[in-house]
Amino acid sequence: MNNFGQVTMWLGLIAVSISSICYLVLCYRKENTIARITARLSFLGFAAFVTVASVLLMHFILNNEFVYSYVARYSSRDLPLEYLISSFWAGQEGSFLLWVLLGAWLGILLMFKAGDMEPQVMLIYNLNNIFLAILLIKQSPFLLLPMAPPDGHGLNMLLQDPWMVIHPPVVFLGYAAFTIPFAYSTSALWRREYDQWIKPALPWTVFAFVTLGAGIIIGGYWSYKVLGWGGYWGWDPVENASLLPWLAGMALMHGMILQQTRKKLRKTNFVLAASSFVLVIYCTFLTRSGVLADFSVHSFVDLGITGWLVVFMFAFIAISLGLLIARAKEIPVSKKGGSMSYFSREFGLIAAIIILCLSTVIIGMGTSAPLITRVLEKASKVSTQFYVDTNLPLAILMLFLLSFVPLLVWGKNSFSSLRPKLLWAIAGAIVSVAVTLLNGYPGMGVLLLSLLAGAAAGINLLLAARLVTKKITVSGAAIAHLGVAFMFLGIVASSSYDRSEKVLLPQGTVKSAMGYDIKFNGPRYSKEGKGVRLHIPLDIKKGKSQFVAWPDIYTERTRNGQVNRFIHPHIGRGLIADLYISPVDFDPGIETASENEIVLKKGKTGQFHDYELTFMAFDVSGMMGKKDAQHMSVGATIVVSYKGGEPVTIKPVITMGKPDSPSSRVKLPGDQEAHLTLKGIDAGAKTIGLVYEGPESAPEKSAQKSPPAVIAEVSIKPGMTILWLGTCLILVGGSIAIPRRW
């Protein structure tokens, strides 16, 4: 079978290599028209081949071509269209192809925007594409299986969410975009043009900041909405992998503005441009090499590309560092003309860059802890409290700067001229502290964070309002800074004043939790994909307000017999706070035809006649290696003690198709003749049905049932609206700045 997808990847690698050779010729022979035309056509060919490869992979996914290993691993026949599409980037190979595809499309625009710097910029940019293309050939999404399975494994249920359809493309668009400032800065060192690169590279830097930031925010919102743990940021190493280049890119963006305006930080910006790009590769190495497999729920396993990623990373470090060292003495230093005022916009920007760099280094060290400790001793990771404790002082300093630096002009400033405007900062600080203290004292560090976030919100609200009415294209920074202040206000509220309570809700009974009256109306089941979704309708009432919440639990059994369980919370959004209801566990209840029958849940203990029974685990050893369903058997491991005596383990077994098989009936301990029979197993509910036979057997009575019940965690999460508003304002501000800088 011809593998045309693999052929297109090879053709793409050849095309981008030819383009690179021609651009290398142009670096020394600018007037070579044939080389320029060939370089551009070859790059367009590279983009075309990568696009064809992507279309082919999507075609194979949409048409259930399970002969391709990648399609079989991440797709299935029962997936809706939107999740079939997102299975394209569900695995490593597909996500690398997406990265190359987006980079190729951006490269077409870059090729025609780079101007006189095109040969050097495109050559550096192409080196990145060459490395990624090699990775795709090394671990291709077009590898074939010896025989096509009837169906694929399907997409992880956690990824079957609309936000996960758009999150990876946005993140990889940001990754691809961060290559461009690096290409410009390296080209500038090559050409000895130490200031000219800032103007064309700055809009690309802002674009990379916005797109990667959008991906991070979407990931945080997905975590809050889907995972059921109630948070939006867990300092997971894979979460940090996107955050690190974003922070470095933010520092670069501010440094480029300072260089463009005041001719300062030339060397610093070369380092920041290289760092933001190299961090993309380094974090890709961390998450894709398998070194974090034991420390992150999001990490990929090693597919054999670790060595290539290391070479990839060190090659670009060598290129950027080598050029910087070679040109270091030539790079002009800004003319001081007297000492720089500490009360100036220049100093404020430099301080902000230092804070962002410190945060990047600290978070990077924490994220790299499993790798560092693996070399020194047994691999381990830092706690989430490490990130909170180390970044809290930096966040306080950053908000302090945002509360007055946006008011400053270039050069010297006088405090007297700022005093009237600072009233807005004082008002914002007073309101923020008052609201914080009314809800309880959160500690001095958090209180100070709240005070300065309020001050920064007040100042930047004033600036944003004035600039929007004056000329909206110059308001981007003020809007983004206002978003930062709002985001931290939301973080303070949601992290310090989050309240929760667990409540047991038997069907039909009204219980109170967190000021709400809650009634469980009984379970509802629906078949979805390869599993079952348990819907948990809850009548919620508070005062005159009444509505129905629909949290649910999805359960599916994998092909190897493992049972996966996913919790989906209900979120009642409010202007001040969210009502967050997450199901913790579900008890289907016990139904008996007589006092001689009992239903036990896994891990639970029950009293039954003179016996104490504990259902420990299912025994599926009888299913292993059996192809005939009639010969498969499933057992239950039960610990029994008679009248408080020594516990004894019994293992009744049911054989499929033989409900009355002798192995399902076992003798109970004690001096009397008593037996226990395994009558039924419900793997989804993790329950077994048992029947007692013995001297104390009771006559059959009418059916009895203890009602189903759900244990739910009910939480009040204040400040979530202002937090999401803040993150959106950051992106809006950055987006407004792109056309201005272009």
Image (cartoon, grey):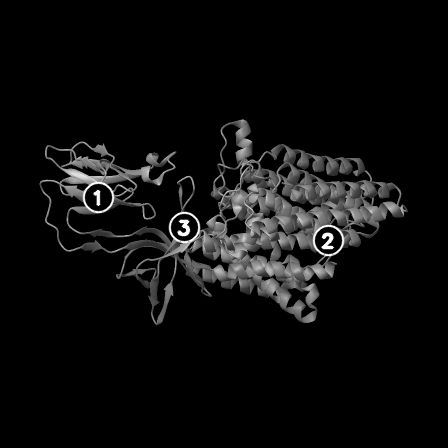
Q: What residue type is labelled 1?
A: Leu
Q: Name the residue under label 3.
A: 531
Q: Tell me the element at label 2.
A: helix
Q: Tell me the element at label 1.
A: strand
Query: With respect to residue 10, does 83 lie above or below?
Result: below
- Relative depth, front residue between 23 and 525: 525
Q: Which mark is residue 585?
A: none
Residue 389 is situated, as x and y percent measured from the top left of the image, at 50, 44
Q: Which of the image's four quarters has the N terminus? A: top right
Q: Mark 1 points at which residue?
A: 690
Q: Distance between the residues labelled 1 and 3?
A: 26 Å
Q: In this view, does 710 lie to the left or right of 675?
A: right
Can residue 420 be seen in the rendering of this structure?
Answer: no
Q: What residue type is labelled 2?
A: Leu
Q: How far apart are marks 3 and 2 (CA)?
A: 49 Å
Can residue 14 be seen in the rendering of this structure?
Answer: yes
In the image, which is nearer the foreground, mark 3 or mark 2? 3
Q: What residue type is labelled 3?
A: Gly
Query: With respect to residue 493, does 322 lie above or below?
Result: above
At x 73% / y 36%, what residue is drawn? 321
Mark sitting earlier along the chain (1/2)? 2
Residue 511 is situated, as x and y percent measured from the top left of the image, at 28, 60
Query: With respect to residue 412, does 273 lie above or below?
Result: above
Q: Name the residue under label 2.
A: 202
In the image, which is nearer the foreground, mark 1 or mark 2? 1
Contact, mark 1 vs mark 3 (Cβ under 8 Å):
no
Q: How far apart are marks 1 and 2 (CA)?
A: 71 Å
Q: In this view, does 380 lie to the left or right of 651?
A: right
